[in-house]
Amino acid sequence: MNGGPRTTTRDIARAAVRSELAQVAYGLIRREGFDQVTVSDLAAAAGVSRSTFLRYFGTKEDAVLGAVEAQGGQLADALRARPSGEDDWTALRRSLDVLMESYRRDPAEALATARLIMGTPALCSRQREKQHRWRPLLVRALAERTDPPRPVAVALSVKAGAALECLDIALDHWIASDGHLDLVGLLDEAFAALAPR
């Protein structure tokens, strides 16, 4: 029997409402601009009260970046699933493919989202905060890839932090190229710069 937390119907319904509110918030902010939209505007556009909106998202930054939070867990799961014989650096790079999927699926939408986040200081700062919380998840996933698990060490933190920085640098160059450069190629190039020789 699984000892983990059970997902209830209420949890599923809450996640669906949260997703819907995030989509409405993102659409309105993308059309009107981040600074021109208030939490009250977002609530009204979603057809809920301001207090209901704030129960799901404490800030409008969180509403726009709601999807980013889940990506840390997805990335850690992808890292744990990599073959045990694969070196850490390769496993980190390959696990990032899970994040590349949205860029492959709809590059124009992904570019618009990346521009919105990177071009809005409040969103960029909040996104970096959220992404910073991914590092301990990746460190634990790296430690758990071996049997027996390795102790969490400085070297694993450095590898996880460097991998996330490679992702950010690849995204910066991709945005600067107006989406013309290949994001996956940029990510590979960033990882190659730090690959063990």
Image: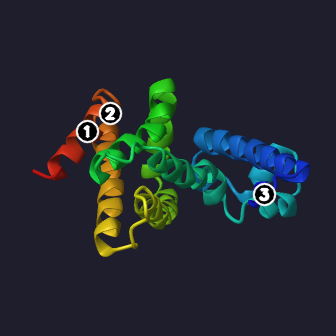
Which mark is first along the chain, 3 or 2?
3
Q: Residue at x 31, y 37 (%)?
A: 174
Of residue 107 and residue 118, the one placed in the foreground of this image is: 107
Name the image quarter holding the N terminus.
bottom right
Percent position (x, y) of residue 76?
50, 53
- How far apart marks 2 and 1 lie (CA) works out to 6 Å
Q: Nearer the viewer, residue 145 or 173?
A: 145
Q: Which mark is residue 188?
A: 1
Circle 3 residue = 40
Residue with the most extreme front position: 148
Q: Comparing marks 2 and 3, which lies closer to the viewer?
A: 2
**What amino acid type should be assigned to the residue bearing mark 2?**
Val
- Place residue 32 in its image quadrant: top right
Is 99 on the left or on the right of 30, as rendered?
left
Name the residue located 32 percent from the left edge and 46 percent from the top edge: 85
Q: In the rendered image, which residue does mark 2 sit on?
A: 184
Q: In the rendered picture of this protein, how many numbered marks are placed on residues? A: 3
To which quarter of the image does residue 24 belong? top right
| Residue 46 coordinates in the image, percent (x, y) | 81, 44
Would residue 93 be found to the left or right of residue 126 on screen?
left
Residue 94 in percent (x, y) is at 36, 40
Which circle's residue, 1 or 3, is located before the other in the chain? 3
Q: Tell me: 34 left or right of 175.
A: right
SS assignment at label 2: helix
